[in-house]
Amino acid sequence: MLGFLFNDRECRELDYVLRKELDEMLFDLNDKRMDEEIKKAIESRYKVIFRMYARLASPREISKYARNRVQHQKKS
């Protein structure tokens, strides 16, 4: 396990970068033209990035990016 010390500005920047990455992955996951194998890889990466974001964000912000697992599994 690694530990990092960030100042306030660095935390805000990391928060921004993670949110943008989550937004982009959500967009890709909703793209009907995307291959299922690629979507699985994106889904795996999404989980990692989401857990990172969850350490910085408020519960209200986290809920914006939480995916409905039951609904996602029905589509597969």
Image (cartoon, rainbow, N blue to C red):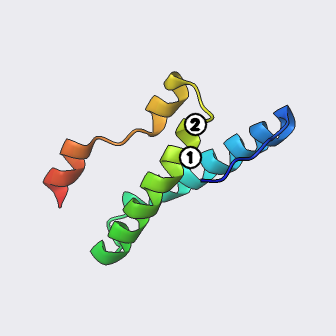
* Point 32% across, 66% down: residue: 32
Q: Which label is found at residue 52?
A: 1
- Split into 4 quadrants, where in the image is the C terminus? bottom left
Residues marked 2 and 1 touching at CB (< 8 Å): yes
Quick one: 74 or 14, which is closer to the camera?
A: 14
* Point 85% across, 36% down: residue: 7
40 left or right of 48?
A: left
Amino acid type, residue under disc 1 in the picture:
Met
* Point 54% across, 57% down: residue: 24
48 versus 70 height, above or below: below
Q: Where is residue 19, by image quadrant?
A: top right
Determine whether the residue tagged by mark 2 lies in a helix, strand or loop. Answer: loop
Determine whether the residue tagged by mark 1 lies in a helix, strand or loop. Answer: helix
Badge 2: few (under 14), some or many (20 or more) residues near its Cα, within 10 Å?
few
Which residue was labeled with disc 2? 55
How far is disc 2 from disc 1 in space, using C-alphas? 6 Å
Amino acid type, residue under disc 2 in the picture:
Arg
User: Residue 55 location in percent, x, y?
Assistant: 58, 36
